[in-house]
Image (cartoon, grey):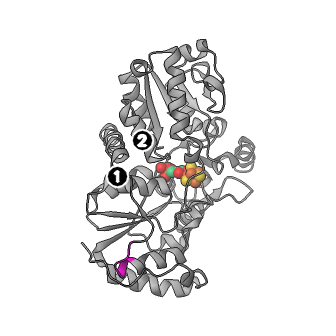
Amino acid sequence: MTELTEIPPIAFAAFASLSDADCHARIVAARASLGDKAVILCHHYQRAEVYQYADLTGDSLRLARLASATNAEYIVFCGVHFMAEVADIMSGPGQIAVLPDLAAGCSMADMANLAKVERCWRELAAVLNAEEQVTPVTYINSAADLKAFCGRHGGIVCTSSNARAIAEWAFGQREKILFFPDQHLGRWTGHGMGIPFDEMPVWDPDLENGGLTPEQIRQARLLLWKGHCAVHQMFQPAHIHKFRAEHPDGLVISHPECCFEVCQLSDHVGSTEHIVKIVKDAAPNTRWLVGTELNLVNRLAGEVKEQGKIAQFMSPIVCMCSTMQRIDPQHLAWTLENLAAGHVVNRIAVPEHEAVPARLTLERMLAAS
Ligand code: 13P
Ligand code: SF4
């Protein structure tokens, strides 16, 4: 363990007006001084100016596995809050997860919270035997206390790359699933398992009984929480129709956070890691329309250009994940310099009473996927 110094932490104000070029030299120096005491994990949506410093990259599932496998004392997470929480939960007792900017949250994750999910559970329990009939499944894009909720109620976590396998696991436990917070991933997964739409009603947490009748609740197999990712709602069926009309041989790939119609019109649907792999492995000179965040698409387009492949963004409107964008070279330089000086800034530490049941659900997920 690093010995903490007596010198106070360096304030962020000193970094706010640095240019990216100034940050570069300081990031490289701090990184070198930390050596293998630190590892920088980057999600695929990170901007290029940050992504260049990644030691390891991936989608949420891969990053969760990498966080549980690293021995580094400091896990510097260039992603969003729930990802750093997962890194903290899955790493060992002497390891520290750090999020360079605490404002890097996930607006979809914020669409469910413990009070609302507990109220939903009580309302379900008034109609059904919830503990015996419903498996709660939380998308990994959720706060640690919701993962803990699933741990306490026999539930599990899923990501965009294992949702089908996890739903199969969940149905193996109980006859119904309560899926939160992303209705679109839930619906696409349920559709792939042959569940009709009328057995996948939307649970609106702002309405009494989710806005459903007792009969609808009893009939439901998959209850879909009314949450969504604003970035992925920008992609529309019209964008795919236009692309297909202009490029009949073109291929379409989307993230399952897109709406059902976009997923249905796509040739491939999968996690960010899956999207990167499919396009990179595709035949030379193919053209792709990609329905996910812009930083990923721009990077991918550059990487496949040499093979004559074109990867183009699905929406005519620029839509980035504004919370992922919060991580910039200035915050990364500030974080690394503090760590190199023995000061932990922006630590993400999940309290033990949440971390224990949350770890259980994450371990269940890794075993089932
Ligand atoms: P992936 O797990 O596919 O990387 O998705 C994370 C995410 O937040 C997509 O919006
Ligand atoms: Fe959350 Fe959407 Fe950003 Fe993914 S793209 S981190 S779901 S807000």
Find residue 313 and report its horizontal and vertical position in percent. Answer: 65, 57
What residue range appears in magenta? 339-344
**Helix, strand or loop at disc 1?**
helix
> Magenta stretch: dominant SS?
loop
- Label 2: how many Cα within 10 Å (few below 14, some 14–19, many 20+): many
Marks 2 and 1, how far apart in space?
Answer: 11 Å
Q: Residue at x 29, y 68 (%)?
A: 73
Residue 208, percent from left and from top: 64, 25
Relative to 80, 247 lies left or right: right
SS of the residue under disc 2: helix
Kindly indicate whether the residue at mark 1 contacts the one at mark 2 (C-beta within 8 angstroms): yes
Q: Is residue 285 visible?
A: yes
Q: Nearer the viewer, residue 213 or 68?
A: 213
Q: Name the residue rendered at 56%, 40% in the picture.
A: 112
Q: Which residue is mark 2?
A: 147
Q: Position of residue 324 (x, y in %)?
A: 56, 61
| Residue picked out by circle 1 | 89
Closest to the observer: 235 or 143?
Answer: 143
